[in-house]
């Protein structure tokens, strides 16, 4: 399986003035053609640094793709940088110049003298016509490796990639199109480091791969398999998924599109129970999360004055319970100015559960974190109710 490094070129990218979408597009496209992505690098418009990076990439990768720096101005250095990296001179290609002039003619324009720079490419380069722009592209082969230089304009890059580069790579490296199937398991109530301790050996697998991604109050476990078909990829992933579920138990609450909210609604239906949600300090985010799943019977934070502490919240919840004795009540309150922390209260019949949790991350993430933590506490309560039936 050939390996790929992507080099995006442009000081505007390096300084964060515009986002780099090209590398993401190339990586997502070529991974499905059986190419391993090793590294993505962004470099400013400096020919020496670009040339040095290309030389380094030749030591690691079979395929190097550059984007950007093929324009007509002095600060478009890719042609010279590639020539320097392969120790060649730039050579004028009359056919490329004719293509550039034809392109301008279509736009009813005349190219300026500096546009002629775009017709110079490294001596051994294979010229590639850019049918949707004025910057010709090229490929330079070096033994079993190659460097492909594409335009920085996304529309132009995408056209040339699909029209010419992918067929070229298939022929040169006898590529086999692969299916990449990813399954994401969602876990809550256990942190990333604790999960890592339980599944570290699985994270060392080559195919499928297992990786972790932490969110506030939730950890995603991604199982990614490469195979010739979706069925084969699924067969590779299944035993690993089952092993993860065995090791982590009900820490895992769902897969892929499943959410804590959808699980709660599912459990409520199984128990034939109704839920009332009361929140304060989260701008209605927890209410909105449940409403997106078509859930009704929610009271907003408008009914609550700011609770002074956990006992105050519990008292308010018990008053609501008197009006709705057959409902499970879930209350959550964030009181940063009086007693920092998130207070949770569950009232279900004669059972009252109270707890306060603390989050040390960015304040903006408190609603998301509190929702995930609180909904997981509710999920576990409903699971326990099911067990005790």
Image: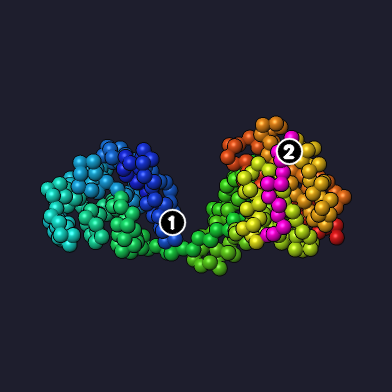
Residue 259 x/y as whole percent: 64, 56
Marks 1/2 in contact by CB < 8 Å: the verdict is no
The residue at the point 21 percent across, 52 percent down is 124
Q: Please indicate whether residue 229 sits to the left or right of residue 115 in the image.
A: right
Q: Which region shows up in magenta?
A: 295-308
Residue 340 x/y as whole percent: 68, 33
Up-down relation of residue 255 to residue 368 (above or below): below
The residue at the point 24 percent across, 44 percent down is 76
Labelled disc at residue 28: 1
Residue under circle 2?
307
Closest to the observer, 267 or 349: 349
Quadrant of the snapshot with the N terminus:
bottom left
Badge 1 marks a residue whose secondary structure is helix
Closest to the observer, 49 or 171: 49
Badge 2 marks a residue whose secondary structure is loop
**The image quarter in which residue 128 lies:** bottom left
Residue 359 x/y as whole percent: 65, 37
The residue at the point 23 percent across, 48 percent down is 71
Closest to the observer, 289 or 378: 289
Up-down relation of residue 60 to residue 241 (above or below): above
Within the magenta stretch, is there residue 305? yes
């Amino acid at each position: 399986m050939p390996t790929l490094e992507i080099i995006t070129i442009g000081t505007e990218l390096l300084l964060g003035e515009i986002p780099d979408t090209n590398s993401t597009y190339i990586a997502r496209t070529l991974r499905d053609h059986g190419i391993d992505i090793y590294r993505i690098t962004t470099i400013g418009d400096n020919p020496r640094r670009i040339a040095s990076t290309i030389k380094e990439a030749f030591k690691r990768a079979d395929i190097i793709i550059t984007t950007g720096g093929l324009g007509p101005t002095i600060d478009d250095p890719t042609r010279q940088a590639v020539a320097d990296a392969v120790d060649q001179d730039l050579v004028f290609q009359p056919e490329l110049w004719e293509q550039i002039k034809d392109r301008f003619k279509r736009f009813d324009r005349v190219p300026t003298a500096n546009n002629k720079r775009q017709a110079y490419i490294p001596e051994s380069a294979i010229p590639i016509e850019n049918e949707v722009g004025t910057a010709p592209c090229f490929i330079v082969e070096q033994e079993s490796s190659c460097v492909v230089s594409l335009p920085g304009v996304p529309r132009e890059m995408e056209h040339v990639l699909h029209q010419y580069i992918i067929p070229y790579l298939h022929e040169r490296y006898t590529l086999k199109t692969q299916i990449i199937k990813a399954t994401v398991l969602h876990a809550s109530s256990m942190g990333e480091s604790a999960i890592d301790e339980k599944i570290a050996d699985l994270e060392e697998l080559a195919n499928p791969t297992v990786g972790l991604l932490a969110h506030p109050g939730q950890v995603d476990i991604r199982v990614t398999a490469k195979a010739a078909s979706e069925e084969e990829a699924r067969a590779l992933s299944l035993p690993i998924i089952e092993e993860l579920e065995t090791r982590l138990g009900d820490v895992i609450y769902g897969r892929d599109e499943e959410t804590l909210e959808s699980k709660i609604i599912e459990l409520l239906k199984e128990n034939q129970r109704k839920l009332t949600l009361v929140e304060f300090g989260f701008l209605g985010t927890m209410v909105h999360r449940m409403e997106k799943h078509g859930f009704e019977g929610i009271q907003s934070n408008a009914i609550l004055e700011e609770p002074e502490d956990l006992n105050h919240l519990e008292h308010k919840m018990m008053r609501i319970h008197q009006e709705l004795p057959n409902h499970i009540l879930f209350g959550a309150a964030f009181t940063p100015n009086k007693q920092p922390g998130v207070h949770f209260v569950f009232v279900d019949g004669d059972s009252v559960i109270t707890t306060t949790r603390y989050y040390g991350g960015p304040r903006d993430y408190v609603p998301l974190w509190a929702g995930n933590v609180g909904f997981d506490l509710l999920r576990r309560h409903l699971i326990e109710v099911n067990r005790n039936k």
